[in-house]
Image (cartoon, rainbow, N blue to C red):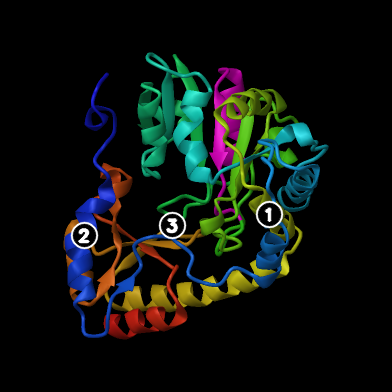
């Protein structure tokens, strides 16, 4: 068996540690804008639902309770515009990163099969292909890919790290191309409810998929919209045949969401007010950071949605990371997301109002 180091890339965040130490030494303390982890409280109605379900001595089911499946299908119809959704079209997962990392393996992919992902992308798409020992390829335009042996096509809109939003026309064209070539299309839509200058659309919308879910799956998470990163709460929705096979595999693997978390998800998806309030917090932080970065000499590209600003000073991303670390601000270097990001940094909006104000002051 090959060593882990032969199968996986170096964990990128380890390279950021010296810069983190520099930023932490700032007299005013570090402003950590490097990781998109929520810092605001879990809404009270979700906490109450979790506590109420705390006495759960039995094993939960992988498919989730009927109440959870009702909540998932109802939300997909209400928020994504999906039509005629049934319980067969949804499946809870233990956080979206787990799903991304293990999907190629669970689909039975292996040597000779190809997984495609955006050229600037969340590193776990590549990691998932590597874990399955499949091949992987990065693309600029998915419909220009060679479909030979291509088994899994990842989309990511809104994008991590760039915040780019794919248009309805782009999504429709890509869905049609994937179906024509028999390629499973999986759309990572975890930031869909965080559109700022564009309105993100799901591949499950009838204008995109034509009312059929054949060959398409969407991935959604409650980590960002509901501050539930610590709960590991996410789900996939779409092609019933694909989800049926995944359900059988995940049953054998014991990949089940805890019963209290399932109850919390039901409460979270049934309430839109807390999402609206959280969006307002992020919008204010985004405006403040964007203005401060531009005045400091940065150029912002894309960033129409999601929890990040994709920023550049037209220099090496590591020079920019070092410059900001001296100001006590930690950001993520763009090359974490592929060589095409080598002159950009990703600035997260996930810091408290007080820390964002400190960053704005230092940038001024």
Is the residue 264 above or below the residue 99 in the image?
Answer: below
Q: Is residue 158 left or right of residue 55?
A: left
- The answer to whether residue 93 shows anywhere in this view is yes
Quick one: label 3, few (<14), some, or many (20+) residues within 10 Å? some
Can you give x and y, in whole percent of width and height, for residue 58 in the image? 69, 43
Quick one: label 2, few (<14), some, or many (20+) residues within 10 Å? few
Can you give x and y, in whole percent of width and height, for residue 344 in the image? 28, 57
Does the segment drawn in magenta span residue 171?
A: yes
**Mark 1 vs 2, N-terminal side:** 2
Is the residue 341 above or below the residue 345 in the image?
Answer: above
Q: Which mark is residue 265?
A: 1
SS for tag 1? helix
Q: Which residue is mark 2?
A: 17
**Mark 3 vs 2, N-terminal side:** 2
Asked if labels 1 and 3 touch by Cβ distance under 8 angstroms, the answer is no
Can you give x and y, in whole percent of width and height, for residue 223 in the image? 55, 56
**Mark 3 vs 1, N-terminal side:** 1
What residue span does the magenta drawing correspond to? 169-192
Q: Residue at x 27, y 80 (%)?
A: 29
SS for tag 3? loop
Q: Residue at x 43, y 29 (%)?
A: 116
SS for tag 2? helix
Q: Residue at x 74, y 63 (%)?
A: 271
Q: Name the outermost residue toward the right.
A: 84
Q: Is residue 48 left or right of residue 109?
A: right
Q: Nearer the viewer, mark 3 or mark 2?
A: 2
Q: Which residue is mark 3?
A: 302
Can you give x and y, in whole percent of width and height, for residue 120 in the image? 37, 44
Q: Toward the viewer: 300 or 283?
A: 283
Give the Cα distance between marks 3 and 1: 31 Å
């Amino acid at each position: 068996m090959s060593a882990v180091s032969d199968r996986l890339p170096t964990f990128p965040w380890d390279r950021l540690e010296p810069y983190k130490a520099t930023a932490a030494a700032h007299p005013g303390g570090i402003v950590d804008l490097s990781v998109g982890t929520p810092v605001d409280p879990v809404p009270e109605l979700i906490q109450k639902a979790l506590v109420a379900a705390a006495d759960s001595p039995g094993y939960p089911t992988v498919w989730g309770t009927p109440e959870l499946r009702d909540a998932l299908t109802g939300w997909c119809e209400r928020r994504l515009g999906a039509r005629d959704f049934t319980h067969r079209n949804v499946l809870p997962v233990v956080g979206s990163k787990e799903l991304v990392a293990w999907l190629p393996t669970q689909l039975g992919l292996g040597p000779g099969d190809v997984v495609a992902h955006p050229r600037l992308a969340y590193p776990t798409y590549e990691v998932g292909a590597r874990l399955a020992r499949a091949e992987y390829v990065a693309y600029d335009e998915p419909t220009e890919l060679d479909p030979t042996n291509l088994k899994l096509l990842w989309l990511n809109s809104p994008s991590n790290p760039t915040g780019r939003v794919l248009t309805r026309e782009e999504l429709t064209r890509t869905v049609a191309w994937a179906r024509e070539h028999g390629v499973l299309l999986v759309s990572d839509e975890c930031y869909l409810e965080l559109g700022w200058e564009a309105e993100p659309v799901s591949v499950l919308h009838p204008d995109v998929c034509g009312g059929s879910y054949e060959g398409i799956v969407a991935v959604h998470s409650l980590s960002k919209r509901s501050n539930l990163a610590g709960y590991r709460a996410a789900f996939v929705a779409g092609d019933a045949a694909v989800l049926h096979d995944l359900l059988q595999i995940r049953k054998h693997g014991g990949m089940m969401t805890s019963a209290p978390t399932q109850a919390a998800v039901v409460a979270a998806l049934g309430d839109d007010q807390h999402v609206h309030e959280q969006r307002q917090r992020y919008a204010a932080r985004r405006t403040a950071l964007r203005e401060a970065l531009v005045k400091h000499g940065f150029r912002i590209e894309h960033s129409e949605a999601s929890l990040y600003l994709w920023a550049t000073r037209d220099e090496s991303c590591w020079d920019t990371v070092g410059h900001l670390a001296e100001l006590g601000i930690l950001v993520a270097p763009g090359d974490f997301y592929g060589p095409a990001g080598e002159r950009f940094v990703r600035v997260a909006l996930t810091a408290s109002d007080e820390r964002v104000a400190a960053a704005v002051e230092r940038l001024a």
